[in-house]
Every structure is written in C-alpha cells, then in structure tokens.
Amino acid sequence: MAEARIIKKYSNRKLYDTVESRYITLDDIANLIQSQVEIKVIDNESGEDLSRQTLAQVVLEQEKKKKNLLPIPELKELIHKGSGSFMEYVRKSLGAGADAISYAEAEIDRLFRRLVERGQLTDEEARKLFKEMVGRFGQGRQYLESKFEERVQQALGTVHISSATELERLEERVEHLEARLVELSEQLQALTGGD
C-alpha cells in the first residue's frame, strides 16, 4: 500500500498538504480521495490522527453543496445508531441490490413462461435463454461484489479502520501475549519463591 500523504491540521483549522507545500481545503481533500490518493490528517501540535474527523467534515461539506452522498433517512439512521452503523448501511444497500437482481430473475422467468404459453418460445429455448441471462446476472453480481469489496478495503485503509481479518489477527496476538505474560509471571514467582 502506498504511503499516505500527510495533511497537517493547524489550531486555526487550516489544512496543510506537506507534499505540495500549500494550504488546502476540504474540497481539495475530497478531490485527493476521489483520485485514490491515500491521506492521513494529523494535528500539527499533538500528532493525533484526525483523518476520521476530517473525512466526516468532507462528507458534510459535500452534503452542504447538494452532492447528496447519502439520502436523509440514512443520515438520520447513522446519527441515531452511532458509529457502527455505517457498515450496517453498506450491508443493507448491498442486500437491496441482491433483492433487485432476484426480482429481475423472477420477472424474466415469468416473461419466458408467458412466451412459452403463447407458443413464441419452446420450453427448451426458454430454459436456455433463462440460464444464459441468469448466468450473466451472476457474472454481474460477482463483478459488483468484487468491486465493492475492493472499494470498501480502500476506504477502510484511507480512514485507517481495521478489517475484520486484521482485528482477528490482533485479537489472536493479544491472546498470545497475555498467555506469554501469565507464563512469565509464573516463572518469576517460581524463581522468587512465590512472593
């Protein structure tokens, strides 16, 4: 993964692009993100990572400019449910897409059955065409799912949110370190006579 471009945020709320050596705006950050540039926003004084807050501000600015990134009900739901609900929103959106594909498949099946009833297609032709079309839907679904997964991973990397796999790996490492700590503690107690 490419190293993130550092953007410094000053106490006067100005943003400074360390690569281009110039002050930038939230719109500039939006353009960087849209151009697939990895960024990391840090507080100039403390070094604290402010990427998440800054990206939230970018979304807010886009909404102010009527970019309509998210529909109002979804924005309200995000606020109501709190921080974990963004991924729920994404899952729900994907579910709606899958439902639409299933609905389209059912409609195509009904259409082919009507054409068979009218004698415009044979059963064999209808099955063959249906199988071909559903196969194309499947390919389209796989393509969309892979592209979506790719974009989610890019977004997670941009805002430095760990994936489930990374979190599981970290949990395993913590468990291993805890076990090692217990082991070392027991060895220390044995050496010191249990004091």
Image: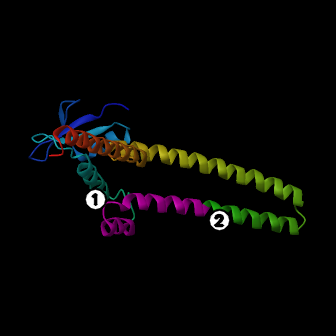
Asked whether 142 or 7 is in front, the reply is: 142
43, above or below 75, in the image: above
Q: Tell me what residue is drawn at x 71 percent, y 50 percent.
A: 135
Q: Tell me what residue is drawn at x 20 percent, y 37 percent.
A: 191
Residue on which disc 2 sits: 103
Q: On the rendered structure, is 29 left or right of 123?
A: left
x and y percent of residue 58 in the render?
28, 51
178, above or below 67, in the image: above
x and y percent of residue 98 in the render?
58, 59
x and y percent of residue 63 in the render?
31, 58
Residue on which disc 1 sits: 64
As drawn, the label of residue 144 is: none
Queried whether the magenta region covers residue 80, the answer comes back as: yes
Asked whether 29 or 4 is in front, the reply is: 4
Q: Quadrant of the N terminus?
A: top left
Look at the magenta stretch and give its main secondary structure: helix
**Residue 28 in sight here:** no
Q: On the rendered structure, is 136 left or right of 189?
A: right
CA–CA distance in space, label 1 to label 2: 35 Å
Amino acid type, residue under disc 1 in the picture: Lys
Secondary structure, mark 2, is helix
Magenta-highlighted residues: 72-100
Q: Tell me what residue is drawn at x 62 percent, y 59 percent.
A: 101
Amino acid type, residue under disc 2 in the picture: Tyr
Q: Tell me what residue is drawn at x 37 percent, y 62 percent.
A: 85
Secondary structure, mark 1, is helix
**Residue 26 in sight here:** yes
Queried whether the magenta region covers residue 108, the answer comes back as: no
69, above or below 181, in the image: below
